[in-house]
Amino acid sequence: MHVYPAELVALINQKWNDSPPPEDVATDPAASLLPGKVALEHLISTCYQVSMMREETRPVTLRLILIAPKFFPADQGPPKGFLRLLFSTPRPFNEYELRRLSPAVDFERSLVGIEPHPEKGFQIWGIINSGIRWLQEERGGNKKTNRLPEAFVVHVTGPGMLTICKGLKIIATLNSGKMLDSTANAFQSKWMNKLFAEEREVLLEMHETFRASVLYPVARIQDEFIESLQFQLLKRVISVSRMSRHGGTFIIFPSSNPPELTGDNPYIQLKYRFLNDEALQRQQSLMLRTIRLATTSLGDIHNPDRIITWKEYVEVRHESAVYDLAEALYEQAQFVASLAAVDGAVVTSSRGALGFGGMIVGSLDKLTEVAIANDTEGKMLTLAKIEGYGSRHRSVYHLCNTIHNVVAIVVSQDGNVQLAKWRNGIVTCWDLTSQMFISDT
C-alpha cells in the first residue's frame, strides 16, 4: 500500500506531541506549531516533487525547516550555534526554487528556512548554516550536538525519500511511497542489547581490574556506557558505507571467537581472513581506553564509586585525549566500512573485523519468505517473499536461517539499510532506511 500526503499528514499530526523534547533543547510552543492540514499537505507534496528532480544531473537533496528566523540569533554560528542568513527579498516556495537552491544548501551543513505568509502561502526567508555536529546523532561522535528547535523539519534524501522530523527527532520516513515506522529501530531493542552483553561483561571486568590496580581515583562504569559506545561505532560503520554509495554486507557474530568460523566451515568462504594477533584486538582496546579516559577524567577522590554515564563523557570537551580517541574510533569504523567495497561480506565479531570478501555458501533453497518487522522487538510482522529481493539480501537471509545467532546488515547502493536476524522461528528484517538509527542520546 502506498502512502500519499493526506495519509502522511494524518500520521504526523498523530505523532507530533507523543514524546517530550530532549532535556538540552529550549522549547517554545510557537516554534513547534504545525500548519493546517491543507498547508501541510502542500508543503510535503512540494518536497516530494523536488525529491524526484535533478539539478545538472545531480539528485536533489536538502533539509528544510518551518520556523520564523527570529528563533535563530543573528550573532551565532557553528559549531555550537546556527548562522541564519536572511534573503533581502523572500523567495517563493515551490519545487523549482528548491531545486535551484539545492546546490548551495549542502545537506550536511545547511537548511532552507521557510515560514507561512498570510497571503502568499509559504515563503523561503533564507538559509541556516548548522554545521555538521547534528550528524553525530546518526554517525556517532562525542562532541555535544547543537540541537535544532523543536520545529517541523523535512530531509529530502533521494527520489521519493522524505524524513519528517521534529527538530532532530524523527516522526516519519517515506520511502518511495511506503511508510517506515521510526520506532521500529532494532538498535534500540532488548534482544539487541542482550546479544552483545557478553562482550560488555568482559569490558566491565577488565575495567574493575584496572580500578583495583591503581592508586588514583577511577570512577565506575555501567552497561549503558558501553552499550552507547558499541552503538556509536556501529552507526559510524553503517554511515560510512551509506555515504560511499557502493553498498556492502556486514555479518556480525556476537562472540569474540565464533566457532562457526573455526577452520573450514560450510557457511562462509572468507577470501581475505585476518591473522588473529594483537592488531585484531584494536577495537576492544579502543573501547577500553575510552572507558578508562572517561572514568579517570571524571574520577572523584571523595566519591570513589561514582558511576559515569555516556552523557557525562560527552561533556568532557577539554581533554585532547578525548579527540584523539574519537578520531581513532572513527578511523576504525572507516576502515571496517571500506572493506565492504570488495565483493563479498565483511565478517566481524564483537571485537572487530575477522576478514572480508566473504561468500555465503551451502544450500540456499530452504527459505522462501522472511518477516518484515513493524516494531522494535519484532513482534508485529508482515511476511514477504524473498524472490522480490536481490541476491545480496537473499544470501544473507539464508545465512541467518542457518546460523541463528548471527546479525546481518545490508547497505544498498541507494543508501537503504536493512538488518536481518533469526527471531522467534523466522528470519526477521528491520528496514533502517535514511537515518532511522538516529537516537535521542
Image (spheres, rainbow, N blue to C red):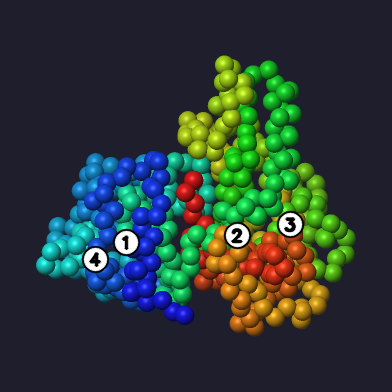
Instruction: Give me the C-alpha separation between circle 3 and circle 1.
Output: 39 Å
Pick whichever, 160 or 324, lies toward us: 160
The amino acid type of the residue labelled 1 equals Leu
Instruction: Give me the C-alpha separation between circle 4 and circle 2.
Output: 34 Å
Residue for badge 4: 36
Which label's residue is closer to the chain start, 2 or 1? 1
Query: Is residue 308 positioned above or below 286 on the image?
Result: above
Locate residue 368: give its quadrant.
bottom right
Between label 1 and label 4, give the one nearer the viewer.
4
Instruction: Give me the C-alpha separation between circle 4 and circle 3.
Output: 49 Å
Residue for badge 3: 253
The 10 Å Cα crowd at callout 2, few under 14, some 14 to 19, many 20 or more, is: some
Residue for badge 1: 64
Residue 410 appears in the rendering: no
Which label's residue is closer to the chain start, 3 or 1? 1
Locate residue 411: give its quadrant.
bottom right
Query: Is residue 349 positioned above or below 12 on the image?
Result: above
The amino acid type of the residue labelled 3 equals Phe
Q: Where is residue 335 in the image (x, y as percent from the top left)?
A: 63, 54
Which label's residue is closer to the chain start, 4 or 2? 4
Instruction: Give me the C-alpha separation between circle 1 and circle 4.
Output: 18 Å
Between label 4 and label 3, give the one nearer the viewer.
4
Which label's residue is closer to the chain start, 4 or 3? 4
Between label 2 and label 1, give the one nearer the viewer.
2
The 10 Å Cα crowd at callout 4, few under 14, some 14 to 19, many 20 or more, is: few
98 sits left or right of 232 in the view = left
The amino acid type of the residue labelled 2 equals Glu
